[in-house]
Image: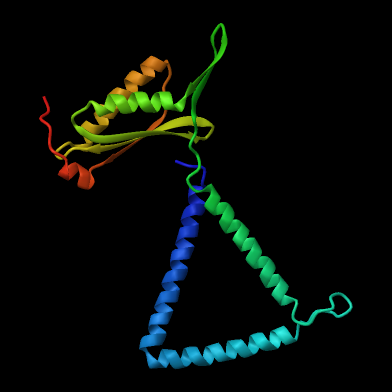
């Protein structure tokens, strides 16, 4: 639940993982198999020779730029700068999407619009879930999804509590808050157990 495009995110992670996997496998083969090592050495030597000839064949026109060297280096620098800019933009977008405003009620009162902050919902729902003995911990956050506020409720269940029971508990709390607010908010419920649920002292449930 953030502003990062999920498809682009997965494509980027896949490409990076594929690149790392391919590079690691190639290095392992070169280090372990003599035949592959010899072939790699010959291929590298041929590639360096071709690159050298290509750079020598593409010099800067002296009447345009009074420097020596190939104009391909500037293309490579421009491509590298563009790649860095894309990666920086991608990194800065990670984790965004949180919002501090839950909802704006326009025309609901004679005084004008009413703005409800996200902290109101987060504190109210967390407090209602804290008193439930079936849960070890809870955390509520608010995100902006498709121009609408949505709640993310993450809970940690005690040992022996089924996901169905935990989901019902959260639904009851969310339903009560929706009735209090007078509208229905979309919500994502994340249910987990883990080490904390196994080591926390059990509480008898009536």
Q: Is residue 36 above or below residue 104?
A: below
Name the outermost residue toward the top: 110
Count of numbered labels shown in the rendering:
0
**Residue depicted at 60% across the width and 57% down the height:** 86
**Residue depicted at 75% across the width and 86% down the height:** 57
Quadrant of the snapshot with the N terminus: top left
| Residue 53: percent from left, percent from top | 69, 88
Name the outermost residue toward the right: 63
Q: Quadrant of residue 187?
A: top left
Q: Is residue 182 above or below residue 202?
A: above
Viewer-nearest residue: 12 or 121: 121
| Residue 93: percent from left, percent from top | 54, 48
Colour pattern: rainbow
Q: Is residue 80 left or right of residue 189?
A: right
**Residue depicted at 23% across the width and 25% down the height:** 131
**Residue depicted at 72% across the width and 72% down the height:** 74
| Residue 179: percent from left, percent from top | 37, 16
Q: Is residue 163 left or right of residue 104?
A: left
Viewer-nearest residue: 42 or 125: 125
Q: Is residue 87 visible?
A: yes
| Residue 42: percent from left, percent from top | 52, 93
Q: Is residue 185 visible?
A: no
Q: Is residue 113 left or right of residue 198?
A: right
Quadrant of the snapshot with the C terminus: top left
Q: Quadrant of residue 121?
A: top left
């Amino acid at each position: 639940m953030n502003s990062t495009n999920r498809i682009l995110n997965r494509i980027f992670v896949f490409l990076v993982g594929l690149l790392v996997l391919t590079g690691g496998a190639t290095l392992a083969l070169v280090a372990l198999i003599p035949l592959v090592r010899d072939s790699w050495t010959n291929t590298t030597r041929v590639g360096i020779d071709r690159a050298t000839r290509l750079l020598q064949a593409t010099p800067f026109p002296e009447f345009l730029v009074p420097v020596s060297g190939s104009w391909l280096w500037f293309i490579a620098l421009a491509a590298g700068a563009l790649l860095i800019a894309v990666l920086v933009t991608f990194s800065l977008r990670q984790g965004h999407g949180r919002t501090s405003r839950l909802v704006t009620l326009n025309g609901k009162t004679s005084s004008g619009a009413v703005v409800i902050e996200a902290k109101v919902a987060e504190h109210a729902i967390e407090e209602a879930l804290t008193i439930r003995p079936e849960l070890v911990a809870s955390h509520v956050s608010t995100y902006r999804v498709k121009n609408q506020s949505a709640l993310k409720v993450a809970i940690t269940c005690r040992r022996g509590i089924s996901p169905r029971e935990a989901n019902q508990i959260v639904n009851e709390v969310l339903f009560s808050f929706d009735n209090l607010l007078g509208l229905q908010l979309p919500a994502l419920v994340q249910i987990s157990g883990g080490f904390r649920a196994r080591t926390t002292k059990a509480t008898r449930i009536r």
